[in-house]
Amino acid sequence: MPARVTVVIPNWNGERFLELCLGSLRNQSFKDFETILVDNGSSDGSLGFVAERFPEVKTIALGENRGFAEAVNEGIKAAATEFVALLNNDTEQDPGWLGALVSAAESHPESGLFASKLIDFHDRTVLDGAGDAMRLSGLPYRLGHGERDRGQFDVPGHVFGACAAAALYRKALFEDVGLFDDDFVSYCEDGDLSFRAQLAGYRCFYVPDAVVYHMGSASTGGKRSKTATRLGTRNSLSLLVKDLPLSAVVHILPFFVLGQLARLITAAATGTLGAHLEGLAGAWRHLPLMLDKRAGIQKWKRVSDVEVRRLLRESSLAAAASIARRLRDRVVSR
């Protein structure tokens, strides 16, 4: 009898993380799952390590680094289960993580994707994320990121999207709205998928009992690396071109301009200005491709523009409250 869930783990030179990641996955209280590790041409012996230490894990060897999106897509296509969970290799999961997600999926048929509670791996008093938001500036934001965990995200509920570092999806969702966008490579591809899911009428449900400890951007050198900055800048803009209804543009324009100015200042202050400008140029080169994809999405979207604007307002307010708490925590800790 087939498993109910396929856990897909993308990997690139992540052997040093796999003992903890796969070991905690092996210790899940929910057992009705299979695991597929998709290897992006690792040269560190990852595949040999998995074969020796975790023979129950299936592997797909891509032979070269094709990025996050294409790797997880290969795993999703290979899954023949009701649900697909995505999991980064730089994570440790609580034993009840997967069971909590499946239980939420059973209780919330209106939702097509389910977000975990992510906690900073190195400082477990700090949140890494509690579902994703989409701000009126057009910039994605991971709710709770950098906040002290005081229980403020211990209540389950709907959010705009799920961080693909640890999330559960109905397989039918991918069949309906498509897979992760390979052209994004890495970064914001989960925001794009969440936006498309919302446009199709799927909700995203946040599950605080699904706890994962996340190192974050371990494969790309950290969130302020040049790679992360370049791809994050390009893809956040491509996401808007691709998914945002035209009627919402006038509502977000002032916030968008301020957000882009803030990103430019941040890039200059963190020594990543060159990578940021490369990302802007990449978004411009992406424009014809994203406009073509946009045309297809706007044809099948099932949610009204009024509803999309409401979702963006609610999501932006949640992000603003989270940012305010994070800034307060920084001031208090000094």
Image: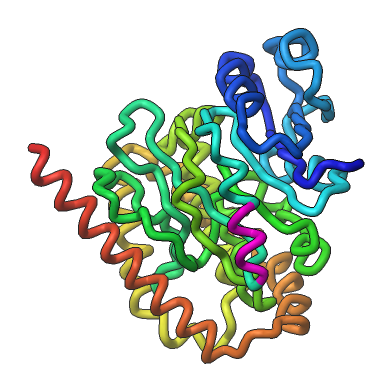
Q: Is residue 133 left or right of residue 28?
A: left
Q: Is residue 107 magenta?
A: yes
Q: Is residue 284 shown above or below 168?
A: below
Q: Position of residue 109 (x, y in %)?
A: 67, 69
Q: Residue at image x 71%, y 54%?
A: 180
Residue 221 visible in the picture:
yes
Of residues 146 and 192, which is closer to you in this image? Answer: 146
Q: Position of residue 218 (x, y in %)?
A: 50, 28
Q: Residue at image x 28%, y 44%?
A: 149
Q: Which residues are magenta?
A: 103-109
Residue 71 visible in the picture:
no
Q: Is residue 255 shown above or below 250?
A: above
Q: Residue at image x 49%, y 34%?
A: 217
Q: Quadrant of residue 156?
A: bottom left
Is most of the magenta stretch helix, strand or loop?
A: helix
Q: Is residue 115 shown above or below 319?
A: above
Q: Is residue 229 left or right of residue 24?
A: left
Q: Position of residue 108 (x, y in %)?
A: 61, 67
**Total marks drawn?**
0
Of residues 306 and 137, which is closer to you in this image? Answer: 306
Of residues 158 and 229, which is closer to you in this image? Answer: 158
Q: Residue at image x 34%, y 64%?
A: 319
Of residues 227 and 90, which is closer to you in this image? Answer: 90
Q: Is residue 105 magenta?
A: yes
Q: Position of residue 136 (x, y in %)?
A: 40, 74
Q: Quadrant of residue 25?
A: top right
Quadrant of the frame with the N terminus: top right
Quadrant of the frame with the C terminus: top left
